Structures are given as structure tokens and as C-alpha cells.
């Protein structure tokens, strides 16, 4: 028996998210008295693969096949299912990001495994598997039980600390049987020169309280000072003030940064559904009864266009003194 974790790479490099997943898997493996097997798909240098052992992977299974260069859910799930069978894994862990959310349901059906998506902590029980997760857009918690023998968990980013184990993993090539792949990618556009929302540990987000796109320079300046990504509420993207790629919320990107600034955002339930897993929320709004203050850890009642310049000055002074 083992715990299998899919470690996604970006252009042959692992990011903090992959190390969080391995650390999480390592703790589960420790409690089950077993080992962690990481699966890497694509071309990754041996040194980077070995780095997964630093966070608890005892073995790294490497799958290099040109047919897998583009994400095809059916093919990727075939790889993961065969790897899980090969390693006797009853617990499979993926990231709760676009790729993980695309793969997990199909993998669950293929393996006849129970699926708990968007977990933020360790299981409270293993026989049966019980994991607590947020529900009702973060307004409540649910203890979800898996009745099947196998379990699939998708872990929210920034919800589990990276823990070093310093294991020297074995690295093994694996050539699973692949189904016919019909996916064709005709064009790829990559964002450059800015921090992606999916990777950001700090996010500075603006809402209608900014009153217009001409006032957005303050959002961008604060994000630059903090090394943060920028985001917005749905009304802002609908109005065309910002691109839909920055829209966070239940109908946009669901994020879980360590620090989320909600500036001029009232906090509709749809918006909170996408940001409620943030570790710390700082809100600025003129309405003291705005729903965002119920979710916020820190709140400032005031016009964001007046508060934001003071925040920028304060952070500049803080950085200059450190």
C-alpha cells in the first residue's frame, strides 16, 4: 500500500504547490505507516525529480511520452490509475486547481474511488476516510466520509505547510498503456511578466468601489510592492474595467492565497465562494454592513480611493525599514 500524489510541473519545473501536495501526502502516509509515491508526467530533470524527496516522496514515477504533452483527461487518468494499481495505492492526492479538478472526477469513476474535493486539512479518520472541508461557499464545514476502499483527495493551494523530510527517492521510469488521444491544441497563450493568480500567495483585488478603471493604478502599485497578483470582482470584469482572467469568485477563479486584499468589494456570496479559503482577508469598504466584513480578518471602513494611498505609503515605509 502507498499514497500516490500527482505532482504537476510547469515547463519542467515544480512549484510550491507540488511541494505542498507531497508534504500533505507524506503526513497521511506517516499516519497510515506507508510511503509516498509521486507521479511526474513530462520531461523534468533528474535533480528536480529528486527534490520531491526533500518533502517526503520515497519514490518518483516518471512518465515521458510525447502523446502526453497536451492535457488529455482520459490519457492522464489512465496513467494515474495504472500507477496507483502498480503501487497498491488506496489514497490518491491531486491539487485543487484547474488540472486537478479536471482529472479527479473521471479518475474517481475509473478507479471506483470516493472523491473529496477542495480539502484543507488532514483526515480525521482513515477507516473509513473522513475529511473536513468547507461547504456553502465557506459558511460552514462538512465532514465528508468515503465508503469505498479507495479515496481521491484534491487539496486547496496554501492550505498545508511545506514540510521537509529529506528522503532520497528512487526514480523509476514507467510506460503505461495509453488510450487513443484525440485532443489537439492549436494555440497556446501564456501570461508573462506578472504573477499568476493560481500561483500567488498574496492577491490584491478591486471591486466597484474603485469607481472606474482609471483608478486602478493604486491596485497595481500595491500589488507590485507586495509581489502580489491582481484580481477583481465579477461586476468589474463584466463592465470591462479588467479582463475576465482576473475575475475571482464562484463563477470565476477560486483561489486560496495566504493574504487577500478585498478593496471596494461588498462581498456577495458568489465572490466569497471563490476567496473564502484565503488564510487572511483584509477588506476596505464604505459600508460597515457589507458582507465582506463578516468574512474578513481585518476591516477598514472608508473610501478605498482615500485609504489605498495610505496603505501604499505604509507598505513602502515598512519595506524600506526592513
Image: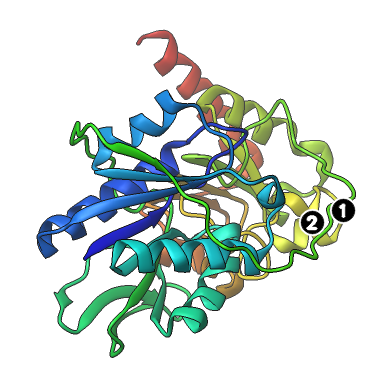
Q: Residue at 42% of width from left, 54% of height from top?
A: 278
Q: CA distance from mark 2 to mark 1?
A: 5 Å
Quarter in which the N terminus is drawn: bottom left
Task: Specify whether 35 is left or right of 225.
Answer: left
- In this view, the residue in front, 197 or 150, is 150
Residue 135 in picture, x, y percent from top left = 41, 79
Residue 176 in picture, x, y percent from top left = 53, 59
Quarter location, residue 55: top left
Task: Specify whether 294 is left or right of 183.
Answer: left
Quarter in which the C terminus is drawn: top left
Quarter location, residue 29: bottom left
Q: Residue at 43% of width from left, 44% of height from top?
A: 17
User: What label does residue 240 carry, if any?
Assistant: 1
Residue 93 in picture, x, y percent from top left = 38, 62
What colouring method underlies this structural image?
A: rainbow
Q: Secondary structure at mark 2?
A: helix
Q: Secondary structure at mark 1?
A: loop
Q: Residue at 23% of width from left, 79% of height from top?
A: 130
Q: Residues within 10 Å of mark 1 (few under 14, many from 20)?
A: few
| Residue 290 in view (yes/no) | no
- In this view, the residue in front, 140 or 160, is 160
User: What label does residue 237 carry, if any?
Assistant: 2
Amino acid at each position: 500500500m502507498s499514497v500516490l500524489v500527482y505532482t504537476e510541473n510547469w515547463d519542467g519545473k515544480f512549484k510550491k504547490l507540488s511541494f505542498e501536495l507531497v508534504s500533505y501526502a507524506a503526513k497521511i502516509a506517516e499516519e497510515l505507516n506507508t510511503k509516498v509515491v509521486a507521479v511526474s508526467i513530462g520531461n523534468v530533470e533528474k535533480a528536480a525529480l529528486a527534490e520531491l524527496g526533500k518533502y517526503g516522496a520515497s519514490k518518483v514515477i516518471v512518465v515521458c511520452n510525447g502523446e502526453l504533452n497536451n492535457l488529455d483527461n482520459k490519457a492522464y487518468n489512465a496513467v494515474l490509475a495504472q500507477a496507483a494499481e502498480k503501487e497498491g495505492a488506496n489514497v490518491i492526492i491531486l491539487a485543487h486547481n484547474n488540472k486537478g479538478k479536471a482529472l479527479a472526477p473521471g479518475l474517481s469513476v475509473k478507479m471506483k474511488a470516493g472523491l473529496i474535493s477542495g480539502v484543507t486539512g488532514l483526515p480525521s479518520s482513515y477507516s473509513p476516510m473522513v475529511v473536513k472541508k468547507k461547504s456553502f461557499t465557506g459558511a460552514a464545514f462538512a465532514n465528508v466520509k468515503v465508503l469505498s476502499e479507495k479515496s481521491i483527495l484534491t487539496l486547496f493551494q496554501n492550505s498545508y505547510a511545506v514540510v521537509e523530510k529529506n528522503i532520497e527517492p528512487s526514480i523509476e521510469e514507467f510506460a503505461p498503456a495509453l488510450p487513443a488521444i484525440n485532443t489537439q491544441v492549436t494555440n497556446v497563450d501564456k501570461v508573462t511578466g506578472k504573477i499568476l493568480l493560481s500561483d500567488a500567495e498574496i492577491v490584491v483585488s478591486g471591486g466597484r468601489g474603485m469607481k472606474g478603471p482609471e483608478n486602478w493604478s493604486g491596485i497595481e502599485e500595491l500589488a507590485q510592492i507586495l509581489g502580489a497578483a491582481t484580481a477583481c470582482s465579477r461586476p468589474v470584469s463584466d463592465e470591462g474595467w479588467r479582463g475576465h482572467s482576473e475575475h475571482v469568485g464562484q463563477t470565476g477563479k477560486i483561489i486560496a492565497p495566504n493574504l487577500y486584499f478585498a478593496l471596494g468589494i461588498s462581498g456577495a456570496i458568489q465572490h466569497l465562494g471563490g476567496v473564502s479559503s484565503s488564510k487572511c482577508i483584509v477588506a476596505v469598504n464604505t459600508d460597515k454592513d457589507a458582507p465582506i466584513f463578516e468574512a474578513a480578518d481585518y476591516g477598514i471602513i472608508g473610501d478605498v480611493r482615500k485609504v489605498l494611498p495610505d496603505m501604499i505609503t505604509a507598505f513602502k515605509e515598512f519595506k524600506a525599514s526592513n
